[in-house]
Image (cartoon, rainbow, N blue to C red):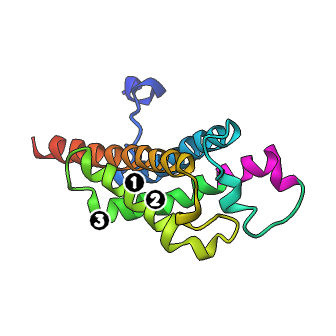
Amino acid sequence: MENEKLEQNKHEKPISVLGKALITGFIGGILWSFFGAIASYFNFTSVSPATFVLRSWLHTNWSDGWLGELISIIAIGLLSIITAIIYYGLLKKIEGIWPSAAFGIALWFVVFYLLQPVFPNVSHMTDLDSDTIITTLCLFLLYGTFIGYSITYEYQDVNNTTNQ
């Protein structure tokens, strides 16, 4: 009886697959937009996270500095939760790395082609230089793979555990 009351014997409730997907989306957005900021700093790309999130609507001095990048990275992390929900809803049951990589590439086309009018500070896809296209495409591919494969793996792991 006394043994059950000890804190070391209590078990935490596991986080649901959707909860882990939301966390994965936030972390993926923070991680890969941070790498995007680094790529922009070293001139691998002319597009940085702040170019999308802040500089498209704000034209202030602080949005061009590190504070603008930091706020943009956090904002992309929050927006990435929506991306994770979309992946969770549509593609969580499809196994393999290739669907998540294709999801990342499709997301690149959505952001740079379909949503281009929303981001007036970003040049049209056909006007971007090859370094920017290749770098951002690789970042989105890795982002989609991170989000998608993590969500699919967790979903398959939970389903295989409950079926055994």
User: Amino acid under label 2?
Assistant: Trp
Q: Which residue is at the far left?
A: 164
According to the picture, the residue beneath numbered tag 1 turns out to be: 104
Residue 154: say if magenta. no
Q: Quadrant of residue 107?
A: bottom left
3 or 1: mark nearer the eye: 1
Above or below, 44 against 106 in this view is above
Q: Is residue 150 left or right of residue 44?
A: left
Dot 1: within a 10 Å radius of its alpha carbon, few (fewer than 14), some, or many (20 or more) residues? many
Q: CA gap, disc 3 to disc 2?
A: 17 Å
3 or 2: mark nearer the eye: 2
Residue at 84% in and 65% down: 59
User: Amino acid under label 1?
Assistant: Gly
**In the depicted view, which residue is nearer to us: 59 or 125?**
125
**In the depicted view, which residue is nearer to us: 50 or 154?**
50
Q: Is residue 98 left or right of residue 109?
A: left
Residue at 65% in and 37% down: 38
